[in-house]
Image (tube, rainbow, N blue to C red):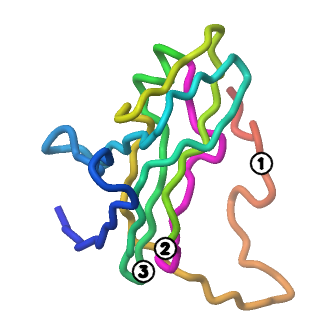
Amino acid sequence: MKRVKILIKRLKKGVVHLPEYMTQGSSGMDLFASLDEEITLQPGERRMVPTGISLALPKGYEGQIRPRSGLAIQKGITILNTPGTIDSDYRGEIKVLLINLGSEPYTIKNGDRIAQMVISPVSQAILVEVQELPPTGRQEGGFGHTGV
């Protein structure tokens, strides 16, 4: 497993949990809510939830913010813009856009695990405009073109 050094800054003294891998084989580290007061998400409601941290990712890497499967299946809590992207030149607070797709209100408390973050290498494309694209067996077959 490749390892990369990430600089991290606590934006509040004391109460902020740093991201944490929960098992040795985890690809994503859990992100924790950093709240002065609880947030209750009503069904259908969305809110930005702060984590109290900022990062300096190396050039050529991104942070992907993904839902926690347990929250999604048990409570209907997920992320609207998933995966969210943290670019290597972003230095602001990491916030997570949560939505309650469940049927009951859900309360988020300070220190709750709200999402996971995967650090991934990225590439930037060099676009080359052409008159025709090389042919493939699929061509323009899109959604559902191979059947159910």
Q: What element carries label 3?
A: loop
In-image side of 138 versus 22 (left or right) = right
Pointer 2 residue = 91
Query: Where does the N terminus fall, quadrant-wise?
Result: bottom left
Residue at position x 63%, y 89% in the image = 126
User: How many residues crowd around disc 3 within 10 Å: few (fewer than 14), some, or many (20 or more)?
Assistant: few
Question: 32 or 36, which lies in front?
Answer: 36
* Spatial CA span between label 3 and label 2: 15 Å
Q: In this view, does 24 lie to the left or right of 148?
A: left
Please identify the dominant SS of the magenta region: loop
Q: Nearer the viewer, mark 2 or mark 1?
A: 2
Q: Name the residue under label 3.
A: 60
Query: Disc 1 residue type?
Result: Gly
In the displayed orientation, state which residue is furthest to the top. 104
In the picture as drawn, the residue positioned furthest to the left comes out as: 24
How far apart in space, not on screen, are marks 2 and 1 (Cα)? 38 Å
Q: Mark 1 points at which residue?
A: 142
Residue shown at 80% from the left, 89% from the top: 130
Q: Give the range drawn in magenta.
A: 76-91
Q: In this view, does 53 lie to the left or right of 8?
A: right
Query: Which of labels 3 and 2 is toward the front?
Result: 2
Disc 2 on helix, strand or loop?
A: loop
Point out residue 29 in the picture as x, y percentages from the top left corner: 30, 47
In this rendering, is residue 140 above or below 66? below
* Residue 135 position (above or below residue 27): below
